[in-house]
Image (spheres, rainbow, N blue to C red):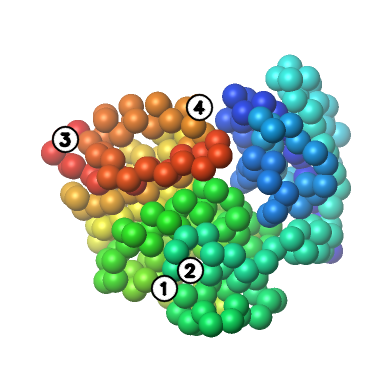
């Protein structure tokens, strides 16, 4: 049975991106965040301040647990936050959040249904994404994912080629595939990648997954669109790798943008020739859809 350490930094919103960086610097392959809605994430039985958010990472039981705890405790004290550091087995993790996970409809068309639940009544099979997110991000309950789904439902067309960057559970890749797109996905976290592949197999979906970032993606035909629910910092660092993969006029849907840092995305977009065509906000989060004007860079 695999053992994990779950390190959760509860921080004021302004420090969310820094908290994610602090967790990543200690060797986490992926970091998830939440703004206090006790729906998706495990271990959310404690109360959060209304402005508070948390960033959480999982670390293998590799003997460095106490060092990590000390480093993160000091970081939390410096940033007006606090650390929760918990030892979990994969089984405990799964059973603790499963009880909160119910069929939901994040957008207009698709229902996201836990793999172990019955289909919602009266919903056509083509409109159901059946997921077991395991330890990966992407249940559909987080606003950043839900807004991706709302924008994707409007913008993805059958027969197009879409790339899902940071697929997590595979939720967005599956939505695009259900809409008739040819989909490829990348995910650097090997645990999440395994979960995504299982979810793709559950749908018998032909979605090629690269374990890595867009830089490791084998070259292929230019894409018509990119789905990227990342963070402001990752969007900034990864966008240069996106542009060689898309055709002029391609659509890019970005989410995971903390509103306090939205201006940085507008600046990034201006520099890259991205023109906004839609924007959604929910809670502390923003998602923006762009069209790429290759001439306008
Ligand atoms: C917020 S989750 C999004 C999951 C899912 N696509 C969704 O919308 O719910 C971000 C994902 O990006 C992955 N990721 C982290 N760094 C990345 C990078 N440099 N390139 C691509 N994906 C990355 C994380 O492991 C994580 O699974």
Q: Is mark 2 within 8 Å of ligand 1?
A: no
Query: In the image as oriented, which residue stretches furthest toward the top?
Result: 78
Q: Secondary structure at mark 2?
A: loop
Locate residue 102, reporting x and y percent.
67, 66
Q: How many angstroms separate mark 3 from mark 1 (CA)?
A: 32 Å
Q: Nearer the viewer, mark 3 or mark 1?
A: 1
Judging by the rendered image, the residue that carries numbered circle 3 is 296
Q: Nearer the viewer, mark 3 or mark 4?
A: 4
Query: In the image as oriented, which residue stretches furthest toward the front?
Result: 122
Q: How many angstroms separate mark 3 from mark 4 (CA)?
A: 26 Å
Q: Which is nearer the N-term, disc 3 or disc 4?
A: 4
Locate residue 38, reporting x and y percent.
73, 49
Looking at the rendering, in which quadrant would you find the N terminus?
A: bottom right
Judging by the rendered image, the residue that carries numbered circle 1 is 178
Q: Which is nearer the N-term, disc 1 or disc 2?
A: 2
Looking at the rendering, in which quadrant would you find the C terminus?
A: top left
Q: Secondary structure at mark 3?
A: helix
Crowding at label 1, few (<14), some or many (≥20) Cα neighbours within 10 Å?
Answer: some
Q: Secondary structure at mark 1?
A: helix
Judging by the rendered image, the residue that carries numbered circle 4 is 260
- Residue contact between numbered discs 4 and 1, judged by CB atoms under 8 Å: no
């Amino acid at each position: 049975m695999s053992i994990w350490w779950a390190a959760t930094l509860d921080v004021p919103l302004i420090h969310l991106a820094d908290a994610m960086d602090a967790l990543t610097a200690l060797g986490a392959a992926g970091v998830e965040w939440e703004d206090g809605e006790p729906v998706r994430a495990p271990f959310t039985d404690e109360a959060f301040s209304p402005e508070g958010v948390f960033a959480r990472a999982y670390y293998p039981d590799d003997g460095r647990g106490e060092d990590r705890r000390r480093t993160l405790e000091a970081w939390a004290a410096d940033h007006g936050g606090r650390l929760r550091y918990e030892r979990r087995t994969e089984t405990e993790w799964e059973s603790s959040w499963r009880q909160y996970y119910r069929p939901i409809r994040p957008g207009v068309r698709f229902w996201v249904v836990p793999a172990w639940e019955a289909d919602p009544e009266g919903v056509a099979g083509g409109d159901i994404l059946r997921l077991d997110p395991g330890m990966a991000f992407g249940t559909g309950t987080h606003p950043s994912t839900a807004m991706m789904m709302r924008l994707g439902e409007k913008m993805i067309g059958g027969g197009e080629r879409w790339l899902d960057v940071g697929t997590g559970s595979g939720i967005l890749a599956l939505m695009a595939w259900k809409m008739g797109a040819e989909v490829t996905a990348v995910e650097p976290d090997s645990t999440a990648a395994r979960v995504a592949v299982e979810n793709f197999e559950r749908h018998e979906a032909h979605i090629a997954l690269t374990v890595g970032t867009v830089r490791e993606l084998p070259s292929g035909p230019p894409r018509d669109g990119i789905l990227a629910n990342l963070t402001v910092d990752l969007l900034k660092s990864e966008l240069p790798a996106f542009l060689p993969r898309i055709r002029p006029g391609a659509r890019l849907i970005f989410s995971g943008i903390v509103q306090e840092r939205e201006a940085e995305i507008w600046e990034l977009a201006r520099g890259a020739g991205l023109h906004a065509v839609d924007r959604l906000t929910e809670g502390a989060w923003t998602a923006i859809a762009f069209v790429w004007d290759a001439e306008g860079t």
